[in-house]
Amino acid sequence: MTYKIALAQAYSDVEQTVNQKKLTEVVKEAAAHGAALVVFPEMFMSTTAIDATLAEINQHAESLSGPFVDNAKQAAADNQVWIIFGMREQNDDPNDQRVYNTIVIINDQGDVVTTYHKTHLYDAFGTKESDQIKPGDKLFEPIQTPFGKIGLFVCYELRFPEVARYQAVHGADVIIIPTSWYRGPLKEYHWTSLLKARAIENTTFIVGCDKPTSDARVGLSQVVDPMGVVTNQAGSDECILYADIDLDQVAKVRAKLPSAAQRMPELYD
């Protein structure tokens, strides 16, 4: 089975309403090009400064019943595509002003299928995401879709091989990684190397969707096949990257390279 995926390497404005409009436009264009699934970056709903206060962060957070999610649900239903995007989700804990770094998955009927709260936060390279973000308490559970079983994690979690392994062990054929990968020394090298490593280790498709360099990120959104070959890659600018995912390739690669089935987890802990 083969299907088309669209990666929206899209700039995020600080205002949610601007990004709502962009999401609607991108989804419509992607659907017209035959995409069955449209992926947006981490925290696409709104961008804020790294050193933003909690009050500022909360001004740009919404609930899952807020206008941004409602707009995305309508766009998915109108265009009959699945959508994955990132947002800051309000946290109901009165004793914790931080918000969740949430990924939302919406099906082609406009229903929220599931959500994920990022667990491994970006407390590295002089940044402390945990000052603003409340971590989730469990990894994403891969979901069955009309186009295979999809796994997912977010940005910095790419640096933890155990997170990708969990997705593969639980049946993921394709792992989606919405990202906001900041620019910096060796950051492009790390991004591209880790995407390929996770694909090879787990014999899965890896789909990394970043923001463009105009948003201080590395860009280079890409699809990597189960043998670690980059089949489609964006440059540094804002764009929609299209790729065909051939799920039969996963089974073919695993038949030749059954490393996942040969694991000895009893030796690893």
Image (spheres, rainbow, N blue to C red):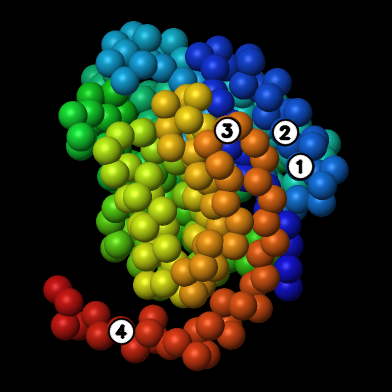
- The earlier-in-sequence mark between 3 and 4 is 3
Tag in front: 3 or 2: 3
Find the distance from the CA under tag 3 to the CA under tag 4.
Answer: 40 Å
Instruction: Tell me the amino acid under the disc marked 2.
Output: Val
Which residue does the numbered mark 2 point to in the structure image? 26
Residue 214 is left or right of residue 92, and the answer is right
Tag in front: 3 or 4: 3
Q: Residues within 10 Å of mark 3 (few under 14, many from 20)?
A: some
- The earlier-in-sequence mark between 1 and 3 is 1
Instruction: Tell me the amino acid under the disc marked 1.
Output: Ala
Residue 249 is left or right of residue 213, and the answer is right
Find the distance from the CA under tag 4 to the CA under tag 1.
Answer: 39 Å
Residue 200 higher or lower than 91, as above or below: below
Residue 253 higher or lower than 157, as above or below: below
Which residue does the numbered mark 3 point to in the structure image? 237
Which residue does the numbered mark 1 point to in the structure image? 30
User: Residue 265 location in percent, x, y?
Assistant: 24, 80
Find the distance from the CA under tag 1 to the CA under tag 2.
Answer: 6 Å
Residue 158 at least partly seen: yes
Instruction: Tell me the amino acid under the disc marked 3.
Output: Asp
Which residue does the numbered mark 4 point to in the structure image? 263
Local SS, label 2: helix
Residue at 36% x, 33% y: name it.
182
Residue 5 higher or lower than 89, as above or below: below
Displayed quadrant of residue 196? bottom left
- Image quadrant holding the C terminus, namely bottom left
User: Residue 253 location in percent, x, y?
Assistant: 53, 83
User: Residue 195 location in percent, x, y?
Assistant: 42, 58
Tag in front: 4 or 2: 2
- The earlier-in-sequence mark between 4 and 2 is 2
User: Residue 12 location in percent, x, y?
Assistant: 54, 23
Find the distance from the CA under tag 3 to the CA under tag 2.
Answer: 15 Å
